Image (tube, rainbow, N blue to C red):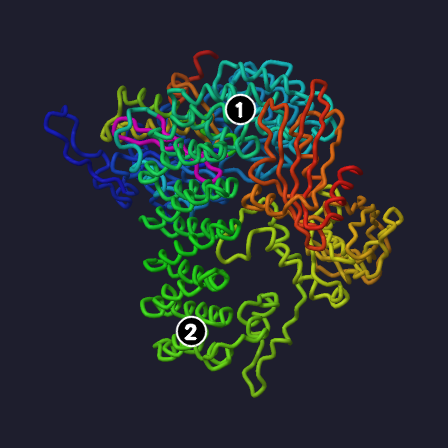
C-alpha cells in the first residue's frame, strides 16, 4: 500500500498531501515527520537524487525537484524500490507538466494539471500508471498511444 | 498553509513573485463555485475554480456538511459540459468530495452513462469514481459492467476496474470474489500494468486458498510476466508457497528455488532485489542457497543509487541476524558505507557490521562509530545502542571498551528514549556480565548526578538498591544516592529513601550511618518522602546499631508483590474505609487469564530497567507465581525450569492448546494452555487425559481441570507427575482433551442447559534430557573452564553420521543438550571443515556444567565430534555423555 504522497515547498509548507490507509489522527504526525526528515537531509541534495529511510515497517523515499520536495511513503509491496519507481514517475511527470524544474510559482500555476496527473499515478494507495507520456494523454482523456 | 513566496533575487527571471493562490479564502472560493450553475458554462473558469477547491482540500481545509453538499450538487451540473478538460476535473473533484450515500444518487445516472460511453476514457474514469463513492446495493447494479471492464481491450479501462476491485474487496468481498474468472483472464493480459493489477487482485481473492495460490504460482513461474512490478509480486507469492510447503519437502530440493535464483539475473533491479530478499528469508536457508543472493546484494552496496544501497544493506542487515558469517564477505563494502551521506544507510551499515564483526575488530569499529554518532538523529542512535548491547553480550571480554562507549554517549545530549536505551543497555550488561557490574553501576551513579528524566533516575535508584549492596564496597554508592535527597524532586527523593533503606537492610555495617541519613529525611517537605523514611526506620530495627536485619524485613524490602496487580487494584478500589484495615490476604491470587509474559516471551527483546532480570527469567517469575498459587503444588519445592510452550494443535484449529513443561526436583507439571476459538461453543469440565505408558518413571499425582472454557478466553489445565527425585527421567506422553460442549447463542451469549461430552486428540508430548538443563551463559568461558578444573572432566568421541552441513550438526547437538552457546560459537563460518562450540548450563540439582565440543566433517558429510564435559559432579558429567550417546 502507498500510504502517503506529500509535496512541500522549500520551507516545508504543504502543497499537496494525499493519504491512503492512514487514520486521520496520524496524518499530522506523518506530515511533521516527513517535513522534518526533509529539512534534516534535503539541504544540499541534488535534484532528483533519491533519499531513503525506513520507520518501523514503513519505507520513505524522498527527493527534491526545483523548489519542491516530494515524499512517498509505502509499506509491504511498496518497499523502497517500488517507491523509487513511484517517485520517478511523479518527478518526471511534474517536470513534463511544468516544462522544466518547477519553481514554487510554476508548480502552483500548473496545480490543477499536477493534481490530475497524481490522480492517474496513484489511486487509492495503488500505483496505477508509470509512463509519463501515457499520463499526459490520460489527463486529456485520450487513450494510451500504444493502444 | 502555503505562504506567499519569499521575494526572489532580482536577477532571477521575471516569474511573478506571488502564488496564484495568495490570499485564497474558503468563503470566497465557495462563492465563486456558483459559476457551476450558470446556464452558459465557462469551462476554463470552472476548471480554475475546481483547482482552487482542490488546493484548499489539499491544504487540509475541510468543508462543512452543508458546504460540501452545495459544492457537490453544483459540480454535478458540470456533466452538461462537453469540454474534456473540465470533465476530467469533475471526476477528480467528485472523488475528493466523497459525497454521502444519500447524495450519490444525484450523480449515479451521469456516471452510469459515462461508464457505457463509447469514449474509453470516460469509461475508465467513471469506473474509478463510481467505485469510490458506491455502496453495496449500487455495486450489484454495476457489477456486470465492471466484469466486462476487467477484460476490456483498453488497458486503462481494465486497470481502472481491477484497481477498483482491490479497493472494493475490503468492503464487498463476496461480490468481488465472483469476478475471479475475469481477473484470471486479465492476468494473461499483454499490457504490463493490467497484469500487475490483476495479479494483485487475484492473489487477494484467493489468499486463503493455499492450493489455488500454489497453482497460480506454478503456472506463472513457467509463463511470462511482463512487468517487473508483477514479477516482484510473483516472487512474494512464490516465497509464501515455499514457506507453506517447506515442511513436507525438507530433504529434497527446495521447490521454486531455481525460479528465484533465475530472477537474480533479471534485467530489472527491483526484481533482482525481491528475489535476493526472498532467498535470504527462506526457512533454514543453506549457505549454498544464500551465496548467489549475497553476491548480488554485495554488488549493489557500491551502487551509485542510494535506494539500491539502502535496499542492499537493509537486506544484509537482516541476514546478519541469522547468518552473520554469510555476510562477512561484504564487510569491506559496508565499512565504506559508514560515511554514506544518507544516514539511514550508514546506520544500517554500522549495525550490520556490529553483528558480523569479530572480537578483534570491535575497537576499530567503535572508533568509527564515535565519529558517526554526533551527526545522526536519536532514533538512529537507539538502533546503534541496541546493536552495541548485543555485541557486548556476544563478546563479553570487550565489555570495557563497549561500556566506556555507552557511558560516554550517556553524558552527551539526547532525548528520553535514547537515554533510556543506553541505560537499559548498561543495566543488561551489568546483569549478564558480572565483571562489568562495578564500573557499570558507577557510570549510572554519575548519570543520575545530572539526569533530567525523573523516570530514569527512579529506575536507576531502584536498580542500585538491588545490585549496589552486593558489591565489594557498597559505601561508595551512598553519596550519589543521598545527593538525590538534597537535589531532586519529590518522586526521585522518595526513591532515594527506599534505596538507602535497602543498603541499610543488606549491609549491616552501614546500618548506623544509613539511620542518620534516613532520620534527616524525616524533615522532608514531601509527605511521601517522610512516610517512607518513617516506615523504613521502624522496619529496619536495631535502632541504628550494627545488627543483622530480620529475614521478614528483607522480604518486605526486596520481595516481589506476590499478587496479580490487577486483582490488587480491584480489591483496593472495592475497599471501603472503615475501622477494619485493608487485609492484603483478601486479594485473590488466581490469575484469570494466561499471563502476558508467556504470550509475548518469544522474540521479545530483553528489556532493561523496570523488568525483572532478562526476558526468560521474567517468564519464569510469572510461572512461579502462577504455580505457587495452586495449593496442590505447594510441596513440590522450587521450580527448576519451565520450557517454552510446545504447540499440541495445528494453527487455526477449533481448540488451540499448547503446553509448558515445569520441571521440579521430584515432579513435572504440564501446564496446558487452552483456547476455544469457536464463538458458538462453551466448553465445561475441560481436562486433559494423559497416557504415560511410554513414560515409565512417571506417575500421575494431580489433575486440575478447568471448570469452563468460554470462547477466546484462554484457560489452563494442570497435570502433575511424580518422578524419581533428581533423576532426569525422560518419556513420551499422549494427550486427549476431554470436555462437555454446550451450544451458545451468539446474539445473547447464553449457553444451552444441556451439553454433550466430547474428546479432541492432541499431539504427543515428550520430556527430554534438555528439559533438565537451564541455559545459563558465562561471560568468560576460558576462565570458567580453568576454574572448574579437570577433576570431573569426561571426554569421549562420537560419530554423528552423515549430516546436511556442519551448522546443522552443531545446532542439533546444542538443541539436544539444551545448553547456552557462549562467545558466538553456535555460528559456524561458511565452508568450515571443523568447528569448536563452547556451551554452558546448569543441570538439575543446580550443578554447573561446561561443555567444549570439537566438530569435524569429512568429504561424504560424515560428522564426528569430541565432547569434553566439565562439571562440579562427575555423575553429571557422565549424564551429559549419556544424553549424547542416547540422542
Query: How many numbered marks have been drawn onto this rendered protein structure?
Result: 2
Say if B730 sits above or below B517 in the image: above
Report the quarter where the C terminus of chain B lies: top right
x and y, in percent, of residue B797 in the image: 74, 32
x and y, in percent, of residue B484 in the image: 35, 66
Front residue (pair B96, B656): B656
Quadrant of residue B717 within the rendered picture:
bottom right
The reply, left or right, for residue B329 in relation to residue B665 is left
The residue at the point 36 percent across, 46 percent down is B63
Which numbered circle lies on residue B296?
Answer: none
Q: Which residue is mark 1?
A: B274
The reply, left or right, for residue B479 in relation to residue B469 is left
The reply, left or right, for residue B240 in relation to residue B99 is right
x and y, in percent, of residue A96 in the image: 32, 20
- Stretch in magenta: A50-75
Quadrant of residue B281 within the rendered picture:
top right
Q: Residue lying farthest right? A: B693
The CA distance from mark 2 to mark 1 is: 64 Å
Q: Is residue A51 magenta?
A: yes
Q: Is residue A41 magenta?
A: no
Tell me which label, 2 or 1, sits earlier in the chain.
1
Q: Which residue is mark 2?
A: B514
* Res B38 visible: no
The residue at the point 76 percent across, 54 percent down is B670
Front residue (pair B114, B868): B868
* Secondary structure beneath label 1: helix
Q: Residue lying farthest bottom? A: B579
Amino acid at each position: 500500500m502507498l500510504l502517503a504522497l506529500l509535496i512541500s515547498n522549500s520551507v516545508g509548507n504543504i502543497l499537496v498531501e494525499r493519504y491512503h490507509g492512514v487514520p486521520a489522527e496520524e496524518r499530522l504526525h506523518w506530515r511533521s515527520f516527513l517535513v522534518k526528515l526533509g529539512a534534516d537531509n534535503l539541504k544540499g541534495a541534488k535534484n532528483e537524487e533519491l533519499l531513503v529511510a525506513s520507520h518501523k515497517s514503513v519505507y520513505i523515499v524522498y527527493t527534491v525537484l526545483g523548489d519542491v520536495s516530494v515524499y512517498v511513503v509505502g509499506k509491504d509491496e511498496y518497499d523502497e524500490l517500488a517507491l523509487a519507481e513511484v517517485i520517478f514517475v511523479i518527478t518526471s511527470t511534474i517536470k513534463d507538466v511544468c516544462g522544466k524544474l518547477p519553481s514554487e510559482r510554476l508548480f502552483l500555476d500548473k496545480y490543477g494539471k499536477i493534481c490530475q496527473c497524481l490522480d492517474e499515478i496513484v489511486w487509492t494507495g495503488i500505483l496505477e500508471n508509470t509512463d509519463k507520456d501515457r499520463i499526459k494523454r490520460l489527463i486529456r482523456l485520450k487513450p494510451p498511444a500504444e493502444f | 498553509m502555503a505562504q506567499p513566496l519569499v521575494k526572489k533575487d532580482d536577477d532571477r527571471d521575471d516569474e511573478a513573485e506571488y502564488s496564484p493562490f495568495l490570499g485564497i479564502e474558503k468563503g470566497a472560493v465557495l462563492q465563486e463555485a456558483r459559476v457551476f450553475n450558470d446556464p452558459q458554462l465557462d469551462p476554463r473558469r470552472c476548471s480554475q475554480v475546481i483547482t482552487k477547491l482542490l488546493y484548499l482540500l489539499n491544504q487540509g481545509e475541510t468543508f462543512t456538511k452543508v458546504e460540501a453538499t452545495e459544492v457537490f450538487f453544483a459540480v454535478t451540473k458540470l456533466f452538461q459540459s462537453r469540454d474534456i478538460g473540465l470533465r476530467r476535473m469533475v471526476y477528480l473533484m467528485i472523488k475528493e468530495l466523497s459525497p454521502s450515500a444519500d447524495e450519490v444518487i444525484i450523480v449515479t445516472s451521469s456516471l452510469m452513462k459515462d461508464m457505457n460511453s463509447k469514449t474509453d476514457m470516460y469509461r475508465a474514469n467513471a469506473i474509478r469514481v463510481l467505485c469510490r463513492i458506491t455502496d453495496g446495493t449500487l455495486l450489484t447494479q454495476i457489477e456486470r459492467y465492471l466484469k466486462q471492464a476487467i477484460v476490456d481491450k483498453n488497458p486503462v479501462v481494465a486497470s481502472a476496474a481491477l484497481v477498483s476491485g482491490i479497493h472494493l474487496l475490503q468492503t464487498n468481498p463476496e461480490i468481488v470474489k465472483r469476478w475471479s474468472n475475469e481477473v484470471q483472464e486479465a492476468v494473461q493480459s499483454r499490457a504490463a500494468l493490467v497484469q500487475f493489477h490483476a495479479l494483485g487482485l487475484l492473489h487477494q481473492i484467493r489468499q486463503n486458498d493455499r492450493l489455488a495460490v500454489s497453482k497460480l504460482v506454478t503456472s506463472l513461474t513457467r509463463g511470462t510476466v511482463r512487468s517487473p512490478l508483477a514479477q516482484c509480486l510473483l516472487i512474494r507469492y512464490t516465497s509464501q508457497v515455499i514457506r507453506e510447503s517447506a515442511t513436507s519437502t525438507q530433504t529434497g530440493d527446495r521447490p521454486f528455488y531455481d525460479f528465484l535464483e533465475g530472477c537474480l539475473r533479471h534485467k530489472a533491479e527491483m526484481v533482482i532485489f525481491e528475489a535476493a530478499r526472498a532467498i535470504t528469508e527462506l526457512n533454514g536457508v543453506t549457505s549454498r542457497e544464500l551465496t548467489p543472493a549475497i553476491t548480488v546484494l554485495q554488488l549493489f552496496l557500491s551502487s551509485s543509487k542510494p535506494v539500491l544501497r539502502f535496499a542492499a544493506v537493509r537486506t544484509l542487515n537482516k541476514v546478519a541476524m541469522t547468518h552473520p558469517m554469510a555476510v562477512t564477505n561484504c564487510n569491506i563494502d559496508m565499512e565504506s558505507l559508514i560515511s554514506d551521506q544518507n544516514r539511514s544507510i550508514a546506520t544500517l551499515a554500522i549495525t550490520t557490521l556490529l553483528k558480523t564483526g569479530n572480537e578483534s575488530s570491535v575497537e576499530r569499529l567503535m572508533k568509527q562509530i564515535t565519529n558517526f554518532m554526533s551527526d545522526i538523529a536519536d532514533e538512529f542512535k537507539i538502533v546503534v545502542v541496541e546493536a552495541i548491547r548485543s555485541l557486548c553480550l556476544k563478546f563479553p571480554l570487550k565489555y570495557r571498551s563497549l561500556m566506556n562507549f555507552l557511558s560516554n554517549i550517556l553524558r552527551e545530549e539526547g532525548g528520553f528514549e535514547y537515554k533510556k536505551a543506553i541505560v537499559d543497555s548498561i543495566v543488561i550488561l551489568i546483569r549478564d556480565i558480572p565483571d562489568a557490574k562495578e564500573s557499570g553501576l558507577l557510570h549510572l551513579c554519575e548519570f543520575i548526578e545530572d539526569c533530567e528524566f525523573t523516570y530514569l533516575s527512579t529506575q536507576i535508584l531502584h536498580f542500585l538498591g538491588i545490585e549496589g549492596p552486593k558489591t565489594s564496597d557498597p559505601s561508595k554508592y551512598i553519596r550519589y544516592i543521598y545527593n538525590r535527597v538534597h537535589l531532586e524532586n519529590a518522586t526521585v527523593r522518595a526513591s532515594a529513601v527506599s534505596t538507602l533503606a535497602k543498603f541499610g537492610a543488606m549491609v549491616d555495617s552501614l546500618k548506623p550511618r544509613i539511620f542518620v541519613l534516613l532520620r534527616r529525611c524525616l524533615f522532608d517537605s514531601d509527605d511521601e518522602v517522610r512516610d517512607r523514611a518513617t516506615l523504613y526506620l521502624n522496619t529496619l530495627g536495631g535502632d541504628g546499631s550494627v545488627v543483622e536485619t530480620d529475614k521478614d524485613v528483607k522480604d518486605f524490602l526486596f520481595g516481589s508483590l506476590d499478587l496479580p496487580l490487577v486483582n490488587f487494584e480491584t480489591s483496593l478500589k472495592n475497599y471501603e474505609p472503615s475501622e477494619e484495615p485493608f487485609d492484603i490476604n483478601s486479594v485473590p491470587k488466581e490469575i484469570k487469564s494466561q499471563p502476558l509474559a508467556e504470550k509475548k516471551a518469544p522474540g521479545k527483546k530483553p528489556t532493561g530497567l523496570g523488568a525483572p532480570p532478562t526476558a526468560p527469567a521474567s517468564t519464569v517469575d510469572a510461572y512461579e507465581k502462577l504455580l505457587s498459587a495452586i495449593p496442590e503444588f505447594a510441596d513440590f519445592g522450587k521450580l527448576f525450569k519451565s520450557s517454552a510452550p510446545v504447540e499440541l494443535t495445528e494453527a487455526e484449529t477449533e481448540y488451540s492448546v499448547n503446553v509448558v513443561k515445569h520441571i521440579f526436583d521430584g515432579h513435572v507439571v504440564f501446564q496446558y494452555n487452552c483456547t476455544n476459538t469457536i464463538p458458538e461453543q462453551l466448553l465445561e469440565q475441560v481436562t486433559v487425559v494423559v497416557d504415560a505408558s511410554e513414560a515409565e518413571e512417571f506417575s500421575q499425582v494431580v489433575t486440575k481441570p478447568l471448570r469452563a472454557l468460554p470462547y477466546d478466553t484462554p484457560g489452563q489445565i494442570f497435570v502433575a507427575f511424580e518422578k524419581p527425585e533428581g533423576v532426569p527421567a525422560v518419556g513420551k506422553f499422549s494427550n486427549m482433551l476431554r470436555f462437555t460442549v454446550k451450544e451458545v447463542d451468539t446474539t445473547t451469549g447464553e449457553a444451552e442447559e444441556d451439553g454433550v461430552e466430547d474428546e479432541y486428540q492432541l499431539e504427543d508430548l515428550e520430556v527430554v534430557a534438555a528439559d533438565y538443563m537451564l541455559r545459563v551463559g558465562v561471560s568468560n568461558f576460558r576462565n570458567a573452564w580453568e576454574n572448574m578444573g579437570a577433576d570431573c572432566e569426561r571426554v569421549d568421541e562420537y560419530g554423528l553420521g552423515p549430516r546436511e552441513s556442519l551448522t546443522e550438526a552443531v545446532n542439533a547437538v546444542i538443541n539436544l543438550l539444551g545448553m547456552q552457546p557462549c562467545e558466538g560459537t553456535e555460528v559456524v563460518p561458511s565452508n568450515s571443515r571443523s568447528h569448536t562450540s563452547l556451551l554452558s548450563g546448569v543441570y538439575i540439582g543446580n550443578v554447573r556444567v561446561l561443555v567444549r565440543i570439537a566438530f569435524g566433517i569429512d568429504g561424504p558429510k560424515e560428522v564426528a565430534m569430541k565432547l569434553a564435559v566439565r562439571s562440579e559432579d562427575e555423575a553429571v558429567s557422565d549424564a551429559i555423555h549419556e544424553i549424547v550417546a542416547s540422542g
